[in-house]
Image: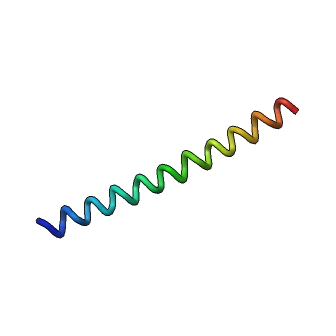
Amino acid sequence: NEVLSSNLSCSSLEIRAVNAEISSALDVKLNSVLSTKEA
């Protein structure tokens, strides 16, 4: 059970990292689209 819980915590951390990367990438895309619209 201890190993299983540690694996779950690691996977959740990885999921958070992936979500952060996706959100930052989306922010960059949105900013670029907005800047091109304003230009």
In the rendered view of the protein, which quadrant contains the N terminus? bottom left
Q: Is residue 20 left or right of residue 4?
A: right
Residue located farthest toward the left when viewing the structure as drawn: 1
Q: Is residue 39 left or right of residue 16?
A: right
> Residue 17 placed where, x, y %?
45, 56
Q: Quadrant of residue 29?
A: top right
Q: Say how many tags the image has.
A: 0
> Residue 21 placed where, x, y %?
54, 53
Task: Tell me which residue sits at (50%, 50%) in the image.
Answer: 20
Scheme of colours in the image: rainbow
Q: Quadrant of residue 33?
A: top right
Residue located farthest toward the bottom when viewing the structure as drawn: 3
Task: Tell me which residue sits at (33%, 61%) in the image.
Answer: 11
> Residue 26 placed where, x, y %?
61, 44
> Residue 3 placed where, x, y %?
17, 69
In the rendered view of the protein, which quadrant contains the C terminus? top right
Q: Is residue 20 left or right of residue 15?
A: right
Residue located farthest toward the right when viewing the structure as drawn: 39
Task: Tell me which residue sits at (40%, 55%) in the image.
Answer: 15
